[in-house]
Image (cartoon, rainbow, N blue to C red):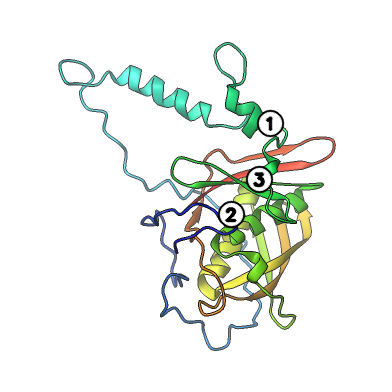
Amino acid sequence: MERGGGGLPQRQPRAPRRRRAAMASIADPAARLPEDSSCAKTDACNSVPQTSANDDREPIGLGPASGEGGVDVAKATEAATMAMAASQPGHRGPNGKAPEWASERHTGGALRSAKVDQYDFEYLDHTADIQLHAWGATHAKAFEQVALAMFNYMTPLEGIAVDESCTRIYEASGRDMHTLLFGFLDEVLFVFSTELFVPKELEITKFDKQEWCICATGRGENFDRERHTSGTEVKAITYSAMDVRQTDTEVEVFVIVDI
């Protein structure tokens, strides 16, 4: 896939960090659906996610601790730690003030000028991947919007029709808010990867903060390379810089996905 949904800049695809069984990529013209799966409901996926999509990356060697041509491990570690902290929403520097970009990018939705069409989401720049930013009056609404943001990045939702005969039921669970968000996005992405089903509409019908489980219904149609625009494939969800914020009036969600 070469172009992000909604006129987003081109990005070169990278090798996935995690492979799924029976992966059916929309980039593969030979990808086929099971004969009886075009309008079948998905199986419930209640497993609690244990690891992030980045856990299988090889460690980067820093070289000698000191000496000619070597790298000071302590300084390199400190620099890496500061860089990672600076990438987190709500980060504040040593002087107790947020960096200049924080007021524009990660506080109170100041960048909502990048809002996509009628949806409550936008795309934020990231070094290698893409960060989804969505919001809503409740956790359920914000989760719905961030999932739609992910699909819109793979194929513009304006080109997806609602086939009333084809719906999908999604179920996910977790241990807390972050693992629940990860599990939900991982489940809808898995259904897309195996069935090529793209929901134009998502409705979370159950959001249980005691048992940490979600039930949702998706309405849309199956992706067809002949009729739909190919954007950039999302390969995996990550925990990197994941954030769920709640105020008196709304909930905001930040998720970085692997492309």
Identity of the residue drawn at 17% across and 15% down: 67
Q: Do we see residue 116 in this rendering?
A: yes
Q: Please tell me the numbered disc located at residue 114.
A: 3
Identify which amino acid the numbered label 2 is placed on: Val
Identify which amino acid the numbered label 1 is placed on: Thr
Task: State the CA–CA distance, disc 1 to disc 2.
Answer: 30 Å
Chain-order first, disc 2 or disc 3: 2
Identity of the residue drawn at 52% across and 80% down: 226
Task: State the CA–CA distance, disc 3 to disc 1.
Answer: 14 Å
Instruction: State the residue in front, 226 or 255.
Output: 226
In the displayed orientation, state which residue is furthest to the left: 68
The location of residue 229, given as percent across then percent down, is 54, 69
Identity of the residue drawn at 62% across and 16% down: 97
- Which residue does the numbered mark 1 point to in the structure image? 107
Instruction: State the residue in front, 5 or 32.
Output: 5
**Quadrant occupied by the N terminus:** bottom left
